[in-house]
Amino acid sequence: MSTATAAVMPANRASWRTRVIRAGAAASIASGLIGLALAPVPEPYLAAWFRQPVLGPVLAAEHLLAVAGLIALWLSKACGDGLLSKAGIGMAVFGQLAWTPAEVIWRFSHPPANFLFELGLPLIAVGLIFAGIGMLRARRWDGWQRFLPLATGLYLPIVFLPAEALKFQRGLAIGIWGIGFVLLGAAIWVREASPRRER
């Protein structure tokens, strides 16, 4: 193998990695925007809206897009290489994967879907909190963006769960959580595009 060929191969791998991370970042933004679309639905109509069968695949896609965003976060190494960060992102991914079939199943049978929702929620919340702590310890991002995973994880027990329990403005609560994924995806995209990004 020539020296020129050997030099091109790492560059090609870096280019492939960048494309994958950007695709995941765009997926995270799309996931958040789907959540934001639910925000304007008033509480009295939210239950009827969620019962629509067509909404199941849409929300399932939302969770798969969020998974792609979390994978991009992992590949970006923004949360560092520690066990806490890897475990956190892995937990959040499995939580989102549990929610994916639950969205479709819930339209036809509530008990198994509710089990998956209840399984996924703590995984996502704790996973994002762990990833957020890892990001703060890694210090690879600066500014307000470094608090995004932690804030997105803390949002679930502090805001979303009370709104769900009280059946108060749940659409708005879901929409605001979606903003976290929009901002996280945008931050990953911008950081990946920056020539000064750290690895």
Image (tube, rainbow, N blue to C red):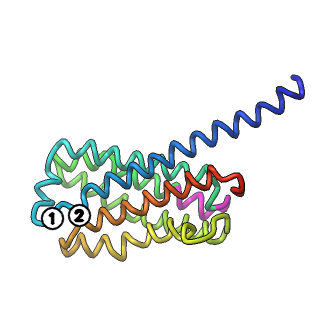
Q: Main secondary structure of the magenta part?
A: helix
Residue appearing at x 89%, y 24% in the figure = 2
Q: Looking at numbered disc 2 in the image, what kind of residue is underneath it?
A: Gly
Secondary structure at numbered mark 1: loop
Image: 81 above or below 104: below
Secondary structure at numbered mark 2: helix
Specify whether residue 86 is painted magenta.
yes
Q: Residue furthest right?
A: 3
Specify whether residue 14 is painted magenta.
no
Dots 2, 1 in contact, CB < 8 A: yes
Depth check: 27 or 130 in front?
Answer: 27
Q: Position of residue 148 (x, y in %)?
A: 50, 67
Quadrant for residue 146, please give it. Answer: bottom right
- The quarter of the picture where the C terminus appears is bottom right
Q: Magenta span covers which residues?
A: 80-89
Left or right: residue 86 versus residue 122 is: right
**Residue that label 2 marks:** 171
CA gap between label 2 and label 1 equals 7 Å
